[in-house]
């Protein structure tokens, strides 16, 4: 009987540990996703600035009549 109880207890503790690891991985994934979204927003802003600067440089080069 003691062997069965130990195995059940072992299985429960393993399941609890696994659940904790899954929860930590989920939190880490959410954090990484937020960082990716932040970087994406920054890249979009940089692209917009580059386009504006490129357009301004082209306008300066155009001959004026």
Image (tube, rainbow, N blue to C red):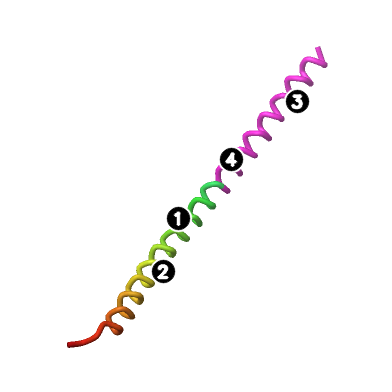
Q: Which residue is mark 4?
A: 23
For label 4, the crowd category at 10 Å Cα-Cα, with few meaning under 14, some 14 to 19 and many 20 or more, is: few
Between the residue at mark 2 and the residue at mark 4, the CA separation in whole angstroms equals: 35 Å
SS class, disc 3:
helix
Image quadrant assignment for residue 56: bottom left
Relative to 43, is 19 on the left or the right? right
Q: What is the crowding at mark 3: few (fewer than 14 residues within 10 Å), some, or many (at least 20)?
A: few
Q: In whole angstroms, how far apart are the C-alphas of marks 2 and 1?
A: 14 Å
Alpha carbon separation for disc pair 4 and 1: 21 Å
Is mark 3 in CB contact (under 8 Å) with mark 4? no
Circle 1: is it few (<14), some (14-19), or many (20+) Cα within 10 Å? few
The residue that mark 2 highlights is 46
Left or right: where does residue 7 sit relative to residue 51? right
**SS at mark 1 in the image:** helix
Which of the image's four quarters has the N terminus? top right
- Answer whether residue 7 is magenta in the image: yes
| Residue 47 percent location from the top left of the image | 39, 66
**Disc nearest the viewer among 2 and 4:** 2
Q: Give residue 22's quadrant in the image.
A: top right
Which one is in front in this view, the residue at disc 3 or the one at disc 1?
1
Helix, strand, or loop for circle 4? helix
* 3 or 4: tag closer to the N-terminus: 3
Single out the mark in the foreground, 2 or 1: 2
The overriding secondary structure of the stretch rendered in magenta is helix
Residue holding disc 3: 10
Q: Bounds of the magenta span?
A: 1-28
Marks 2 and 4, the one that precedes in the sequence: 4
Figure check: 37 above or below 19: below
Residue wearing tag 1? 37
- In the depicted view, which residue is nearer to us: 49 or 25? 49
Measured in 3D between alpha carbons, the distance from the residue under mark 3 to the one under mark 4, in whole angstroms, is 20 Å
Say which of marks 4 and 1 sits in front.
1
């Amino acid at each position: 009987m003691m062997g069965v109880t130990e195995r059940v207890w072992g299985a429960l503790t393993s399941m609890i540990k696994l659940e904790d690891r899954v929860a930590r991985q989920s939190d880490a994934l959410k954090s990484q996703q937020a960082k990716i979204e932040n970087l994406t927003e920054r890249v979009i802003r940089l692209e917009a600035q580059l386009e504006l600067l490129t357009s301004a440089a082209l306008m300066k080069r155009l001959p004026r009549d």
